[in-house]
Amino acid sequence: MLSLSPRTNLLEENDYRYSLQDVENPILYRDVYSYDEVPKIAFNHRRVPMNMPEDIWITDTSFRDGQQSINPYTPKQIEDLFKLLSKLAGPYGIIRQSEFFIYSERDKEAIARCMDLGLRFPEITTWIRASREDFRLVRELGIRETGILVSCSDYHIFNKMKMTRSSALEYYTATVKDALSAGVMPRCHLEDITRADFYGFVVPFVNELMRLCEDAGIPLRIRACDTMGYGVPYSEVALPRSVPGIIYGLQHYSGVKSEYLEWHGHNDFYKAVANASAAWLFGASGVNCSLLGIGERTGNVPLEAMVFEYASLRGSLDGMDTRVITEIAEYYKNEIGYEIPPMTPFVGDKFNLTRAGIHADGLLKDEEIYNIFNTEKLLSRPATVSVSKNSGLAGIAYWLNGHYKLTGDDKLSKSDALVIRLRDFVDLEYENGRVTALSNEELSLRIAELIEDMPFHSLYGRIK
């Protein structure tokens, strides 16, 4: 049967429907996933079309998946971070949703605090156990959507749940029916999709879910979960590892519209951001992230990374205030006590710090040479340098200008007397066996001593 596709505006065949393959033994893709070897990337040279949705957005799992890998947040901390998420999201709500647990009184207090803020974005959603009581609780709280775990690989169905594919499908569909009967929109988390039999289980299962929701008149969201970080963003990769193939297949063979399709990835193989971007490019509207990438094992897709990825792909931040990212990082350090690795892009203390003297010389002449973008404007984080044996006059001058916020005619050059004297002090430190960089505190103390003999210097009054 032919029909005109609303996505491509082309006639397409749509008469084939994949049926459940109820295998006797689990399919574990041992040629790809041999546990004693590095997972392999297989190519089949089948291309799928790039299909960026008209609208794309970010969803947040900091208070669900992110909270499972660190000490639980207090309700006050969740409220504070939620306000920062809303501020970052901007007037158009590019950070569309944030999901919460509802198990404990502490969880319910956090939800109540965030609801009382009256913020339009992010929308509060939940993640629950598959029980009728929990569905009713979601409804009573006035929450529209909840996540439900529906593990889809044979690793989970056979080896963890001790079920067959048909019994798992029956169990999952009964759970979704309970959600629909409670009037709650289900968000089905297809756990471990990058090790699942895509056409033998995933597609026929999603087809059944879509039929149930159509009959109930309630929409369904599909979250494709790359639980172990096995997804690959490259073109022409074979399933089950192909991110483009997964997104295309869910749209083309299961009819999941972009606005109801979401990607959730992990960073075990350093591909979390690339995979999330591929999901956007090939048709998913949503990518699920956590603040600072905090999550199971190596973490989730860092939310702040996808903010900048959004701007790169769309050519605009669409109202997002990226300076809030620095506020979020400072909150984690100062209020939560979380130690951010210093080289972490956008949020680490040293993400835009250079040590090499030749790089510092370039920064002194033109910051754009060695800084990724105007980090002072976009993140309230000016480019910085550390002072070490490789800094030279340029590095010291750049450090002085940055540390004391010197601009215009006040900026010091490499030939300034204070710069030269400080360079001599630094060189002597390393001649005497020092191996570490000098701290800002050490340098400030030495400058205070040097300036005593330089009352004529422009910095004298500022330091004194």
Image (tube, rainbow, N blue to C red):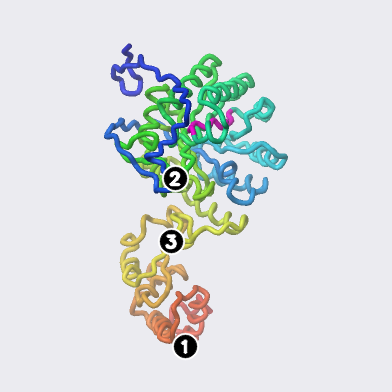
Check the image and report above or below for 371 versus 427.
above
- Residue located at (40% from left, 40% from top): 231
- Tell me the tag on residue 382: 3
- Residue located at (47% from left, 44% from top): 266
| Residue 147 is covered by the magenta coloring | yes
Left or right: 385 with respect to 44?
A: right
How much space separates mark 3 and mark 1, taking CA atoms? 30 Å
Residue 352 or residue 269, whichever sits in front: 269
Magenta residues, start to end: 145-154
Check the image and report above or below for 69 versus 133.
below
Does residue 311 appear anywhere in the picture?
Answer: no
Classify 10 Å Cα crowding around label 1: few (below 14), some (14-19), many (20 and above). few
- Residue, far left: 45
- Tell me the tag on residue 35: 2
Q: Secondary structure at mark 3?
A: loop
| Residue 337 is covered by the magenta coloring | no
